[in-house]
């Protein structure tokens, strides 16, 4: 008789976005004449850049000809893409990453949830709080997190590292020693970043205590400030303690088409065992990875036109972020983020909880955002707005909020 993995039953469910959907549906049904503006989504809205579309067309044509047809992609990904990554994402920042340390994937969500499989079931994890929920959820499924305590919104066997106003939304080194440390900068949902000096402290700490850092840099392309590292490998010693996860979703609009990569340095070892060799055995190596067509599209963003076109898209979103940040600041809100990330994080006013503020904005301004408490217990009292809307709708949303 088969048995299920009972850890799945521990997951509280996708409470956040299903509740938002339900509330918006009820409101729309009751108020059909009201125009809702959504500033809550974490998905991009601009179409793929022309250079990417051209590359997709030509890759499809390759598949139509015997001479250029491609079957299963190579295990780590096509060399043309991994070389472009090594050159543009790392060498240009003074970092040497070998192409056999780069593993092309179908996106950061898969890798950030699957990477825990190469670690022992008893490893203890530490996470930023609040943060992208996938790190905790995947460890719940793997049985590492203990029990969920509904009152506190915490798992008993997880080290939470609060990222709050008092520490400028960057975590402090934990008092209890973790084995696996998940860091996400620029951060979803707070939009905060970490300076190179602060990240160096984490790298030194991980090397000292023998922990591994899983560094999610999905929003790297949004960094605008000088002292903010684009990759953890800008820090000395990171290759012996850190894995970095990247995505083409937010920098090039691949949320629907899927592409990402993960760096596992060969110097990262547990005793004599290279984590790079373990990740090379990951499941889905050939079958789940990214198809040739998408890898060709990914390579196109490293061409001169691809770079320009994708940077223009980021500039568009960041201009929206500026509208939100400055508009809300002018209205007296306490706001952070939105400088190195497409996310703006605001403190809920008048002592409202995250959900009370959600209802208030929906009812009074017909604007939908995301309650901060959905990203972790320290997100209570905060609210996330995103800059992925159109410029016009972003302006209108802020005007409406300012009139409240
Ligand atoms: N990492 C973070 C921090 C994210 O916010 C997201 C998506 O919102 C992802 C990873 C997922 O990226 P992908 O679309 O490449 O799976």
Image (cartoon, helix red, strand yellow):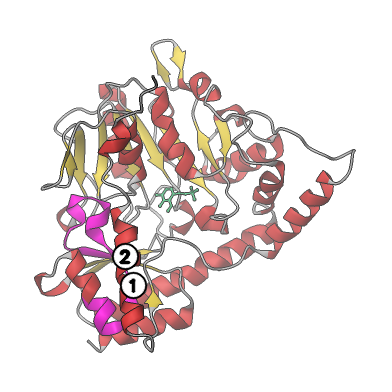
Q: Which residues are magenta?
A: 360-383
| Label 2 sits on residue | 20
Farthest-out residue, front? 1
| Label 1 sits on residue | 24
Residue 197 visible from this viewpoint? yes
x, y percent for residue 157: 19, 31
* Residue 98 or residue 28, whichever sits in front: 28
Distance in Å between CA atoms under marks 2 and 1:
6 Å
> Callout 2 environment at 10 Å: few (<14), some (14 to 19), or many (20+)?
some
Q: Residue at x 63, y 30 (%)?
A: 286
Residue 11 occupies which quadrant of the picture?
A: top left
On screen, residue 188 versus residue 95, left or right, reads: left
* Residue 156 or residue 236, whichever sits in front: 156
**323 shown above or below 95:** below
Total marks shown come to 2
> Callout 1 environment at 10 Å: few (<14), some (14 to 19), or many (20+)?
many
Can residue 133 be found in the magenta stretch?
no
x, y percent for residue 323: 38, 78
Residue 325 visible from this viewpoint? no
* Residue 282 or residue 252, whichever sits in front: 282
Q: Residue at x 41, y 37 (%)?
A: 113
Asked if marks 2 and 1 touch (Cβ < 8 Å), the reply is yes
């Amino acid at each position: 008789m088969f048995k299920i993995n009972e850890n799945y039953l521990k997951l509280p469910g996708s409470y956040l976005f299903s509740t938002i959907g339900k509330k918006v549906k009820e409101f729309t049904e009751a108020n059909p004449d009201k125009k809702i503006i959504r500033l809550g989504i974490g998905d991009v809205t601009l179409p793929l850049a022309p250079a990417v579309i051209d590359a997709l067309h030509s890759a499809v044509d390759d598949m139509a000809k015997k001479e250029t047809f491609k079957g299963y992609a190579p295990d780590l990904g096509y060399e043309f893409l991994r070389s472009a990554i090594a050159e543009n994402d790392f060498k240009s920042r003074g970092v040497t990453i070998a192409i056999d340390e780069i593993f092309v994937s179908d996106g950061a969500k898969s890798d950030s949830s699957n990477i825990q499989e190469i670690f022992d079931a008893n490893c203890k994890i530490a996470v930023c709080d609040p943060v992208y929920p996938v790190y905790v959820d995947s460890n719940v499924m793997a049985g590492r997190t203990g029990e969920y305590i509904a009152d506190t919104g915490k798992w008993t066997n997880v080290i939470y590292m609060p990222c709050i106003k008092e520490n400028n939304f960057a975590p402090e080194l934990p008092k209890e020693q973790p084995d696996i440390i998940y860091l996400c900068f620029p951060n979803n949902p707070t939009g905060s970043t970490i300076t190179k000096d602060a990240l160096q402290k984490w790298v030194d700490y991980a090397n000292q205590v023998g922990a591994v850092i899983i560094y999610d840099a999905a929003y790297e392309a949004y960094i605008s400030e000088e002292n903010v590292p684009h990759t953890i490998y800008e820090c000395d010693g990171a290759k012996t303690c850190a894995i970095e996860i990247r995505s083409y979703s937010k920098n090039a609009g691949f949320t629907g088409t899927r592409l990402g990569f993960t760096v596992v340095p060969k110097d990262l070892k547990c005793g004599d065992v290279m984590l790079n060799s373990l990740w090379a055995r990951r499941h889905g190596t050939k079958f789940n990875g990214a198809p040739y067509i998408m890898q060709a599209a990914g390579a196109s963003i490293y061409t001169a036109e691809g770079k320009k076109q994708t940077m223009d898209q980021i500039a568009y979103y960041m201009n929206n972020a500026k509208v939100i940040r400055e508009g809300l600041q002018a209205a007296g809100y306490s706001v952070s983020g939105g400088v190195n990330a497409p996310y703006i994080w605001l403190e809920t006013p008048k002592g409202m909880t995250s959900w009370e503020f959600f209802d208030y904005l929906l009812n009074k301004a017909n604007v939908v955002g995301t309650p901060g408490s959905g990203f972790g217990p320290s997100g209570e009292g905060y609210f996330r707005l995103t800059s992925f809307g159109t410029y016009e709708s972003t302006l209108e949303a802020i005007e409406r909020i300012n009139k409240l």
